[in-house]
Amino acid sequence: MKKPIAVISMVRNDSFFANKWISYYGAQFGFQNLYLFIDGMDQPLPEKASKINCFQIPHLYLKRAKADRKRAKKISDFANSLYSSYHAVLAMDIDEFLVLDPKIKLSLKEYLQKNFKTDSCSALGLDVCQHPKFEDSIDLNKSFLSQRKYAKVSDRYTKPIVSFKAIQWGSGFHRIRGKNYIIDPNLFLFHFGLVDKETSMQKSNDNELLTSGWRGHIRRRISLFKELETSKPFEGDMLFDKARAYLNKTRKWYSWNKPAPLKFPSIIKIPKRFQKIV
């Protein structure tokens, strides 16, 4: 029998994504193979925490950049202790969901248990956003993608979150230190940070985030709502191959192991075949 697949994340001040993360990845890989760090002894545990390996750790106040580096190192070091027992280890933010294209008639687990020839692989990043004009607030009892039709194809969320050997992730899992990346032709990383506008806008007034250096990041993130309003979306399948080809080969000289931003319009309609997955 092939070894199982492990999934790791860390969460703080969340009442929105953790249970969805547990439900989704638990169904894909087995709840016993999920590892979630709760950042802060004062933090409530997710409802489904008892189903998984859940570790509550003391919160250390740090500025954004340093905190991101520390988190990536902690998760990388923890992941490196798992490879003897697992075929692959996945690490991501709590609002990120790895999805295999439904056109591939395999489960995500079966696909990742194939013999990959690289230390890691990246998934094409889709930054999902509530359309301010056409879509209502999210209903957490329904699948996200049955309620959201639009996304931005994003270099920032084209992340090497799948690893097959011991590696060290950089901040935010955007790169692997000292390693190049290859974007898999069938994997997508759906980022749901902007899936609900009201929830997203609340972060712009979160004092803990603002004082720790997140102001500029939040401002850039919420600008996607306006971009969505003013852009004409492409059908996703018309853009995916073009985007993968560009992101696989294009990078900035000072950031050789991360893809460079796309230089063409990248707002898309998410294909209907994804609606029931997440």
Image (tube, helix red, strand yellow):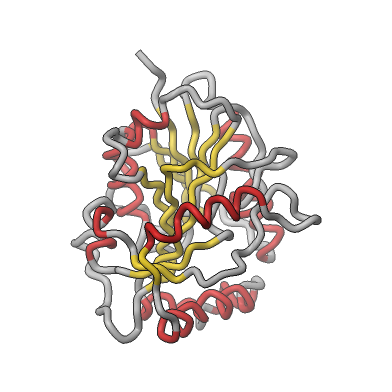
Number of marks in the image? 0
Q: What residue is shown at x 53% (from left), y 19% (from top)?
A: 84
Say if 88 sits above or below 28 in the image.
above
Give the camera-side residue of 122 and 29: 122
What is the x, y in percent for residue 125? Answer: 49, 56
Give the camera-side residue of 164 and 214: 164
Residue 18 location, quadrant: bottom left
Give the camera-side residue of 12 and 112: 112
Residue 166 seen anywhere in this rendered image of the structure: yes
Residue 196 location, quadrant: bottom left
What is the x, y in percent for residue 130? Answer: 35, 75
What is the x, y in percent for residue 215? Answer: 61, 78
Residue 10 seen anywhere in this rendered image of the structure: no
Say if 65 sits above or below 112 in the image.
below
Residue found at the very far top of the displayed protein? 1
Residue 73 location, quadrant: top right
Say if 115 sits above or below 98 in the image.
above
Residue found at the very far left of the displayed protein? 141
